[in-house]
Image (tube, rainbow, N blue to C red):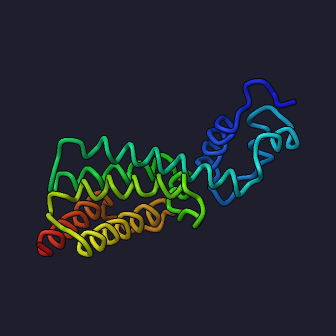
Amino acid sequence: MPRVGLTPQRIVTEAATVADEVGLDRLTLATVAKRCGVSLPGLYKHVDGLDAVRRDISVQATRELTAKLAAATSGVAGKEALQALSAAYREYARAYPGRYTASVQAPAADDREHEEVAVQAVGVISAALKGYRLEGADLIHAIRIWRIACHGLASLEGAGAFGLPDPMDETFTRLIDALDASFRAER
């Protein structure tokens, strides 16, 4: 019989917290079971395995990140929206490194729920870039360029790969300025 109070959602929430603490690649169901106060076999009554939990973390993280991006860009446009979007993305990656790693995983071809949250995320990013009046392929490329730039910075920063003394905030500002100039030039 399943343990009272233990739900798949609670397991995913605990697993996401563990992933933030130790890294998504070091996440184990044994650690999650311990965190939930159950045996590993007891945990398996609620989940289909580590891959399923990682997928669920990805869906949850994408929802969380999308909500943060939407809130950050509400009521702003143009460069201000780009700055807010990028800062919210960077802040999420810093605050929730395990979830952030999960959020960049592409949905499986047959996973409608995961695909739906990914489409919602792209919709928020697209709306934030609306002030640049990019359409069609230009908008798609702008979204990709933005994501590559912000993911690269977030991933390298999270790995401690920037050891030079110059402040990262200045680099981040210059990155956003360069993206802004590029997106304005595409009109």
181 over 36 or under it: above or below: below
Picture residue at 53% right of the left edge, 65% below the top: 106
Counting from the top left corner in percent of width and height, residue 121 is at: 39, 54
Report the number of numbered marks: 0
115 over 141 or under it: above or below: above
Picture residue at 64% right of the left edge, 51% below the top: 22
Picture residue at 19% right of the left edge, 58% below the top: 130
Q: Which of 43 and 87 is in front in this view?
A: 43
The quarter holding residue 123 reads bottom left
Quadrant (top left/top right/bottom left/bottom right) for the C terminus: bottom left
Q: Nearer the viewer, residue 167 or 54?
A: 54
Q: Which residue is farthest top?
A: 4
10 over 176 or under it: above or below: above
Counting from the top left corner in percent of width and height, residue 75 is at: 18, 42
Counting from the top left corner in percent of width and height, residue 2 is at: 83, 31
Quadrant (top left/top right/bottom left/bottom right) for the N terminus: top right
93 with respect to 128 (left or right): right
Q: Nearer the viewer, residue 6 or 38?
A: 6
109 over 34 or under it: above or below: below
146 with respect to 106 (left or right): left
Counting from the top left corner in percent of width and height, residue 145 is at: 31, 72
Picture residue at 60% right of the left edge, 63% below the top: 110
